Image: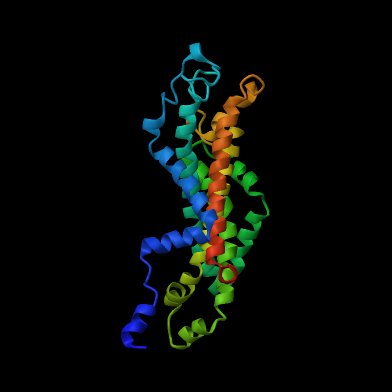
Amino acid sequence: MTATDADTSLPAPQTRLAQFWTFLRRYPTVAIGGTLLLLIILMAVFAPWLGTYDPQALSPARRLRKPSETYWFGTDMLGRDIYSRVVYGARISLAVGLSVAILSTLVGLALGLITGFVRLADSIIMRIMDGLMSIPPILLAIALMALTKASVQNVILAITIAEVPRVTRLVRSLVLGLREQPFVEAAEASGTNLINTMIRHILPNTLAPLLVQGTYICASAMITEAILSFIGAGTPPNIPSWGNVIAEGRGVFQIAYYIILFPGIFLSLTVLAVNLVGDGMRDALDPRLARRM
């Protein structure tokens, strides 16, 4: 066999696009969840063009209209178009979910790195985290919202505080395991300071679990926001969110079930899409599952 024959027998390297399609075929849950999530994101981005009416426009003359060609999802007790409110509500749910996931991950990452390396900080911070974790997240969020006024920013802050302890414990457990690895001990023996050890050797090995955890936090935050809005402790009633729309329809559920049905379907689909992406990423990033696949 000549050198030329040996070169031609090697498989051609895949392009980035080919690698992406191979990844989607290997992990179909990511493809399904990602496609569904992309459609919902596009719906939220193009809400001004997709909405048929102003989501806050009141019209008592058209109250409680059933779904029709004019009002696709019907109207509520104040005559507002349910379809437009559902389309605009995607913005609130996605904004809350993504903001909570990013903020809680960043704060939990910082606290987890500190508690994993500094014993004094571990004793203080983790006792605070244990105290917060002793309260169910939804109850903690309700208590925090009771101390502030209703707004989207306060909802994000309240849910973030409830989610930070879980991220902190996850990062701390990862750091405690990584500290005993030979490459970390070698870095410390060579005189690398604590900050560089965290950034160069510890942080890269925590990103994969944090990415998966972030998707679950995003889904949980959207559900929590809907619950808070449903009980009147979340976003202001004038803001079109899925939780507010469902709350407005509970009093007339027997005669206008569609007010609850459509926002509930979109909320379920969004949470399902995020969870599918998280499950697929977990399978892809877990070396044991990847070898089994």
Question: Relative to 6, is 35 above or below?
Answer: above
Left or right relative to 22: residue 1: left
Question: Relative to 195, is 71 above or below?
Answer: above
Scheme of image coloration = rainbow
Q: Is residue 267 visible?
A: yes
Residue beneath the point at 58% across and 51% down: 162
The number of callouts visible is 0
Q: Nearer the viewer, residue 281 or 97?
A: 281
Residue beneath the point at 48% across and 50% down: 34
Q: Is residue 248 visible?
A: no
Q: Nearer the viewer, residue 132 or 37?
A: 37
Residue 201: % across, % down: 46, 76
Residue beneath the point at 48% across and 20% down: 69
**In this view, which residue lies farthest toward the top?**
61
Residue 9, quarter of picture:
bottom left
Residue 253: % across, % down: 64, 24
Position of the N terminus by quadrant: bottom left
Residue beneath the point at 55% across and 19% down: 66
Residue 26: % across, % down: 52, 61
Residue 160: % across, % down: 53, 50
